[in-house]
Amino acid sequence: MNQLRYTLISDGSSDRMLLPVLDWLLMQHSEEVFVPQWADLARLPRPPKGLRERLQVGLNQYPCELLFVHRDAEEKTWFVRRDEIQAALKGQDAVAAKTLDQFISWLARISGDAAMALQPLVGKHAAALFAFGLCNASLFAACILPLSTAFYICEGMGWESGVDNDFRQAPQFFWLFTVIIALSALVILIPNAPLIAIMYISQVVNGAVLPFVLIFMLRLINDKRIMGSYRNGPVFNTVAWITVIIMIILTLLMTFDLIFPGLFGRLIGR
């Protein structure tokens, strides 16, 4: 069976997580054996700057039969990024290049495959059932997340809360719930809003603040006045604090890697 090398050239080290996704996609659509390469250009003594230069250096350092180019789309739309990639690829010595629009069409095809996997069970209604499931998950998230946030804030501030009350009995609770839903809807309705980037950044922020939340949770669970005999034991406390410390270290490493891309690769000599 033939082996094909493919190279991923991206904006930062965090994009390396796309390699397993590309592996899976390629295996779904080809019987070839693919050998992945991530172009770690930051490790070079003089890392290339512009996209065209990065492509030239990347292809020289990581020769391949298939080239993937990934650009972040937080500041510009993916249409602009696609045109930038296509312009930079002109004249490059690559057998094939899959740009972002083709990658998105692959993802759309995968969603269709997921819907069709339900066909043996529900027949021609598979696509409708899959769409209903996505809609149901979205509605649950839109209701539960603002509701839980309003509960947390009201509990912390000592305000009245509860869905069995009305606006007069718990005004802060219902105003928080309403404002959070309205602001979320306004953000989603912004023309050309980078929705994927918004979802990605929100999850990164969730992960970054989690260690600090855990510190307060551990302090609460060990408060004898609040928990009484249900406090953590010494063994569980040791495991919990070690876990929190590891998460804090990983969060700091992630933050430094975002601010100084490729720093850790250079430090360990990769």
Image (tube, helix red, strand yellow):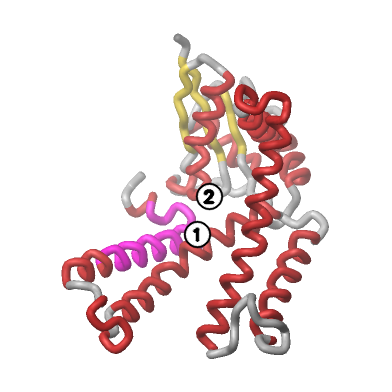
Amino acid identity at mark 2 = Gly
Residue 116 in the image: state x and y as whole percent. 65, 26
Amino acid identity at mark 1 = Leu
Quarter holding the N terminus is top left
| Region of the chain picked out in magenta, as a range | 242-264
Q: Residue at x 60, y 36 (%)?
A: 55
Q: Which mark is residue 102?
A: none
Q: Please report contact status of discs 2 and 1: CB closer than 8 Å, yes or no.
A: yes
Q: Is residue 243 left or right of residue 147?
A: left
Quarter holding the C terminus is top left
Q: Residue furthest front?
A: 164
Residue 89 in view in this figure = no
Q: Nearer the viewer, residue 195 or 270?
A: 195
Q: Residue furthest top?
A: 1
Residue 61 in view in this figure = yes
Q: Nearer the viewer, residue 85 or 237?
A: 237
Note whether 217 is above or below 41 in the view shown: below
Q: Which residue is denoted by mark 2 in the rendering?
A: 12
In the image, residue 56 lies in the stretch drawn in magenta = no
Q: Which residue is denoted by mark 1 in the rendering?
A: 258
